[in-house]
Image: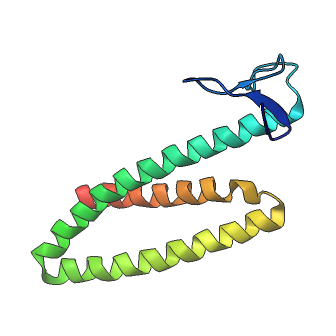
Amino acid sequence: MVKIGGVQMRRGVGRVNRPASRYFLTAAHPTAPPRVLEAMTYATMLLRLNRSMMQLVAESASVVALRSLKLATGGAAAAAEAERMVAEKVLAAAEAQGKAWIDVVGGASHLTPQRTVAMYRRKVRANRRRLST
């Protein structure tokens, strides 16, 4: 038996750990104890954050490719894009830091990573739309 987050878990062979009690790790279970729901919520948040970060990486790769093509053409448009790229990065970092402080002060610091990734994904999508036209 292993105790995880106050819940006794028995180790399964070749399968996911199951709770030793009658409760299963699902938020839909109406009588699940608060610690089980808390553990499930935390695990769900991490999985969603992981998925969002993977999507951000994929979307960013396409923006890097589009930007590289634009910069490779040279000229005034490439110089303007280079300046815009640097300015956007500085502004995005400042915005992320400001929102993180607001989350911490507001008591929602556990949501800061997901909100930060969502903000960057919005900016990357906007860049992809702008560069692909």
Comparing 86 with 25, the one in front is 25
Above or below for 119 versus 44? below
Quarter where residue 17 is shown = top right
Rendered location of residue 20, percent (x, y): 80, 22
Outermost residue on the top side: it is: 22
Q: Quadrant of the N terminus?
A: top right
Picture residue at 23% right of the left edge, 83% below the top = 79
Is residue 133 visible in the rendered image? The answer is no
Q: Position of residue 29 (x, y in %)?
A: 79, 19
Against 83, residue 50 (above or below) is: above
- Residue 104 x, y percent position in the rendering: 78, 66
Which residue is at the front of the view, 13 or 9?
A: 13
Which is nearer the eye, 13 or 21?
13
**Snapshot quadrant of residue 13:** top right
Q: Please name the colour scheme applied to the rendered image.
A: rainbow
Quadrant in the picture for the C terminus? bottom left
Q: Give the left or right position of residue 105, taking residue 97 as reference.
A: right
Question: Residue at horizontal 33%, vertical 83%?
Answer: 83
Between 26 and 114, the one lying in front of the other is: 26
Decide: is 125 above or below 48: below
Quarter location, residue 22: top right
Does residue 4 appear in the picture of this structure? yes
**As drawn, 86 above or below 35:** below
- Whether residue 101 sits left or right of residue 114 in the image: it is right
Q: Residue furthest left?
A: 73
For image coordinates 35% across by 61% down, the residue present is: 127
Horizontal placement of 120 versus 66: left or right? right
Residue at image point 75% right, 67% down: 102
